[in-house]
Structure formats: structure tokens, C-alpha cells
């Protein structure tokens, strides 16, 4: 017999193997092992993995555990993690759409950043649509969407609450502190291993007991709505904020867009920070917790030259401070405004001065957020130190402070203890309060983004809580005595 006469093409071999497994190749994806059903799709926010190895380590550990329990011979049929599986130049949205059409479970790495992510919301929607399709014909929706707490959530969004998922089954330490905490500390090794065993066993069991039919077609994520925006209504009383940006050309945390969460502020296309509006302007009347004022305690190079020798971090004006120079040349004001834009918020920049009390009063009346971005060196200047003390005297529970620290700045490292004491003296009430809205020693651009998102989320939550407390009780309509009609 001729050696090639009865040889079937690779696509036919793949289709035969799929038939033996009782599954089929989703339309629109190639008939190769990469197209076979996946045991899980791992959805995450890029900011949660930037600059640290924990999330990628978790993916590799989970894939290994699932492969062993499923008896899979090819790792390509186990899990999908977009950071490594998509080659440069490929259309990432098409590749992710194909993976979402063939995965059997969906692992959502839940964190404040995750639920603020446009693209994580779209990935969630794409898988949820498959679950809805599978639940037709009188069958309930299979529990194949598996949330994993990466970072604890103060107020879980509606999309997560609806799942009624019991995290305690995966370990008490994990349920209280999140998976990232297990990975951070060596003493949590045994609990992390138990978590992996429990989750991988659940994934394999669900994949086999509740097989999810592949999607009929794949589509780019640009065609999929954001589930978090669709199912999470605005909190009571907040109908003044702008709609969250979406679609091409708007800021996003698309994890496939490049090495950083947001575009490089040091490029030629760097946007100009929005000036502080006047009290009579239209934008000032918008108000609401979807608006934030960034108050910069930072100086020009001329002012700061009286205190320190290395001046590469500063420019001709206060808003040109680059705290993470030279590893990142972005201005802090632009970094902050781009993070705010990704949260669907409008923002303005202003310099810290002795009118900070008036600013806080106005923002409080309009339920707006105020966040101070503080250069420890600037806190040594008299004007800034006095303004910081005025801010501290009010001790506002809904405003935050973020203090960048650059480990590459040798002069700051050498004077760190003195600088810290000066700042502590000026912000004594905030330091004593030990509030999570007061964040110091933020050591990198990635950590800056994450800390700022957390401050924004927590500030919004406190504003909503205060609104609920201060809202007057509904007046009950008086009811007369019941009247009996009859003879």
C-alpha cells in the first residue's frame, strides 16, 4: 500500500478525535489541538499582573493540576491565559473570542481592578451568553463561571453577588484575604496547595459533568457589551456622573494593548491635564462621585532646587513632576488622570495651596472625590507644609492621599527617614487614622495605578455610605382606621 494513500488530513484527524470525545470544533476556529475544548479560560485585569509574578505562577500551577486530574496529554487543551498564548501580531480579540467559544469553565480573577475593566466585563459577557444558551429548554444554568478572589472586595458588584458562590470551601485564609495573599507569603504554601487541589478538582468535575457546548461562532470583543456596566446600576443619588468611556479610541485597560496598563504618558501624544474649573463653569456644576480633583503637592524645579541636588524629576511648573524617572518618564498628573478616565471618571488637576479647606468644602457639598498626590520633598517647603496641615485638620473620611516613592532615587533613599518624619508631622491625623485611603511609599508606576484605583473605589463607596446614612427617612402616609362597608 502506498504510504500516503489513506492518510487523512490533519483536520480530519482532529475532527475524528473530537468525535471520540463527544464534542465538536466551534465554527470559526481551526481544527487543530488548539481548537479543542479548553478546561478553563482565565480572565484577569492586566494591572493585577503587571510587575509581579504571582498571577502567571497561579495560571501555570493550575494548568498543571488540571492536566493531571483530567488526564490530558496536550497542555494546549487545558487552559487559556492571553499573556503568553497570543503571539505578537495576531488579532488578540479574535483569538480570545475563539478561546471563549470553546472553554468549558471561566475563571474570573476578581479584584477592584477587574470589575473596573472594560475588557474583563466583555469576556464575562461572552461566556455568560454561552451559559444562557445552554440553559434553554427548561434546564438551569450550569455553574461554570467560577470567581476567584484575587484581591478582597469591599462591595462586591451585582454580577458577582448573583453567583452565590461559596469561597470558604476553598480555604478560610483565601476567603478572607484573597489568592494573591496566599502567593505572597511563604508560610501560606500548604494552604495554597490545598486551594489548587480544590479548584482544579472542581474545574475537571464541572467540565465532565456539565459539558458546555462550544459557541456557534467567534467574534471580536469589540462587539460584546460590558457585563459590569450592564448589570451594575449606579448607586442611589449618583445620576450626574458621565458615562463610562468605551469603544475604539477611549482609554481602556485592554490587557492585550501593550506592556503597560495605559499608554505611555511620556509620548508625544501626552494629553494636557485639565485645569481646575471655576465655580461658575458648567463642568463644576456636574458633581457626584464620578468626578475627582487631584491636588498636587509638588513644586517646580526652581522651587525644589533649594532643597535637593538631583532635579531630573521636576520641570518648569508644579504639574511636571515625574516621580518614577528614569524608569518611567510620565508626569504624575497625567498618570492619575488616565487612571481616572479608565474608571469612567472626569478629573481636574490643581496645585495644593492654603485654599485647600475651601476645595474640600465644595467637593464635600457636591459628593466629589479629592485625592492628594504628595512629593515628600515638597512637604518641606513652608507653603506646602502649612497647606498639608490645613488639609489634615479637616480629616475628611472620603478624601485620599497617595505618596509616590522611587527606589531608584538615591537622594530620596538617603534622606527618607527625615522626609517621612516631616510628612508625618504635617499629616498627623491621617497617619493616626491608619486609613487605607492614606497610601505611602508607592514604589512603581504599576503600584501607583493599582493604589489609585483602590483609593477611588473606596472613596466612592464611602460617599455612597454617607449618602445612605444622611438620607432622610421616607415619610409614611397616614392611614385612617379601616372602614367596613355594609348595612
Image (cartoon, rainbow, N blue to C red):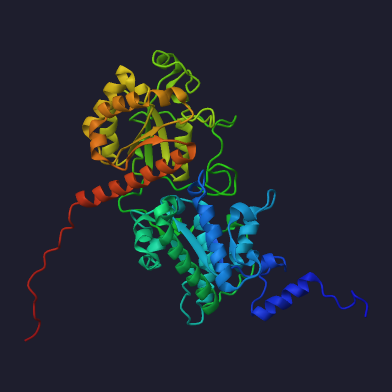
Say if 401 sits above or below 140 in the image: above
- The structure residue drawn at horizontal position 48% and vertical position 71%, both measured from the top left corner, is 202
- The residue nearer to you, when weighing 326 against 12, is 326
Seen in the image, is 184 located left or right of residue 436? right
- The structure residue drawn at horizontal position 72% and vertical position 66%, both measured from the top left corner, is 30
Question: Does the rendering let one see residue 430?
Answer: yes
Seen in the image, is 173 located left or right of residue 133? left
Give the position of the C terminus as an image quadrant: bottom left
Write down the quadrant of residue 451 in the picture.
top left
Seen in the image, is 274 located left or right of residue 6? left
Q: Exactly how many numbered labels are in the figure?
A: 0
Question: Residue 245 in the image: x percent, y percent?
Answer: 49, 46
- The structure residue drawn at horizontal position 38% and vertical position 45%, both measured from the top left corner, is 454
- The structure residue drawn at horizontal position 9% and vertical position 85%, both measured from the top left corner, is 486
Question: Does the rendering let one see residue 225?
Answer: no
Question: Residue 1 in the image: x percent, y percent?
Answer: 93, 80
- The residue nearer to you, when weighing 206 against 485, is 206
Write down the quadrant of residue 96 in the picture.
bottom right
- The residue nearer to you, when weighing 369 against 391, is 391
Question: Residue 284 in the image: x percent, y percent?
Answer: 36, 35
- The residue nearer to you, when weighing 256 against 234, is 256
Amino acid at each position: 500500500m502506498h504510504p500516503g494513500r489513506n492518510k487523512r488530513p490533519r483536520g480530519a484527524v482532529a475532527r475524528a478525535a473530537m468525535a471520540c470525545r463527544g464534542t465538536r470544533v466551534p465554527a470559526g476556529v481551526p481544527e487543530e489541538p488548539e481548537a479543542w475544548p479548553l478546561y478553563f479560560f482565565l480572565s484577569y485585569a492586566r494591572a493585577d499582573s503587571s510587575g509581579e509574578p504571582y498571577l502567571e505562577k497561579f495560571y501555570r500551577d493550575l494548568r498543571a493540576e488540571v492536566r493531571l486530574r483530567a488526564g490530558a496529554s496536550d497542555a494546549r487543551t487545558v487552559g487559556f491565559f492571553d499573556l503568553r498564548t497570543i503571539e505578537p501580531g495576531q488579532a488578540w480579540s479574535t483569538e480570545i473570542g475563539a478561546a471563549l467559544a470553546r472553554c468549558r469553565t471561566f475563571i474570573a480573577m476578581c479584584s477592584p481592578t477587574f470589575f473596573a475593566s472594560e475588557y474583563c466585563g466583555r469576556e464575562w459577557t461572552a461566556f455568560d451568553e454561552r451559559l444562557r444558551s445552554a440553559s434553554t429548554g427548561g434546564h438551569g444554568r450550569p455553574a461554570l463561571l467560577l470567581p476567584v478572589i484575587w484581591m478582597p472586595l469591599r462591595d462586591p458588584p451585582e454580577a458577582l453577588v448573583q453567583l452565590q458562590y461559596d469561597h470558604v470551601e476553598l480555604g478560610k485564609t483565601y476567603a478572607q484575604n484573597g489568592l494573591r495573599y496566599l502567593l505572597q507569603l511563604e508560610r501560606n504554601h500548604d494552604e495554597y496547595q490545598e486551594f489548587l487541589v480544590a479548584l482544579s478538582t472542581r474545574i475537571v468535575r464541572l467540565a465532565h459533568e456539565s459539558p458546555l457546548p462550544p459557541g456557534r461562532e467567534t467574534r471580536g470583543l469589540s462587539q460584546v457589551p460590558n457585563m459590569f456596566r450592564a448589570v451594575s446600576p449606579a448607586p442611589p443619588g449618583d445620576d450626574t456622573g458621565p458615562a463610562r468611556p468605551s469603544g475604539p479610541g477611549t482609554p481602556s485597560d485592554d490587557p492585550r494593548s501593550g506592556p503597560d496598563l495605559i499608554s505611555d504618558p511620556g509620548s508625544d501624544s501626552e494629553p494636557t491635564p485639565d485645569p481646575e474649573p471655576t465655580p461658575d463653569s458648567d463642568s463644576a456644576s456636574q458633581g457626584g462621585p464620578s468626578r475627582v480633583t487631584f491636588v498636587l503637592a509638588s513644586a517646580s524645579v526652581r522651587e525644589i532646587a533649594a532643597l535637593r541636588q538631583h532635579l531630573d524629576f521636576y520641570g518648569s511648573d508644579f504639574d511636571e513632576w515625574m516621580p518614577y524617572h528614569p524608569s518611567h518618564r510620565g508626569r504624575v498628573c497625567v498618570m492619575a488622570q488616565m487612571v481616572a478616565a479608565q474608571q469612567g471618571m472626569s478629573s481636574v488637576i490643581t496645585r495644593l495651596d492654603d485654599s485647600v479647606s475651601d476645595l474640600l468644602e465644595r467637593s464635600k457639598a457636591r459628593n466629589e472625590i479629592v485625592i492628594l498626590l504628595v512629593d515628600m520633598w515638597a512637604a518641606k517647603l513652608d507653603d506646602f507644609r502649612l497647606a498639608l496641615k490645613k488639609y489634615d485638620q479637616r480629616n475628611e473620611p472620603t478624601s485620599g492621599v497617595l505618596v509616590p516613592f522611587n527606589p531608584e532615587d538615591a537622594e530620596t533613599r538617603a534622606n527618607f527617614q527625615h522626609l517621612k518624619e516631616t510628612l508625618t508631622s504635617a499629616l498627623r491625623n491621617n497617619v493616626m487614622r491608619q486609613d487605607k485611603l492614606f497610601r505611602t511609599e508607592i514604589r512603581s508606576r504599576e503600584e501607583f495605578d493599582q493604589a489609585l484605583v483602590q483609593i477611588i473605589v473606596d472613596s466612592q463607596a464611602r460617599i455612597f455610605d454617607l449618602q445612605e446614612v444622611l438620607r432622610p427617612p421616607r415619610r409614611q402616609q397616614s392611614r385612617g382606621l379601616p372602614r367596613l362597608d355594609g348595612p
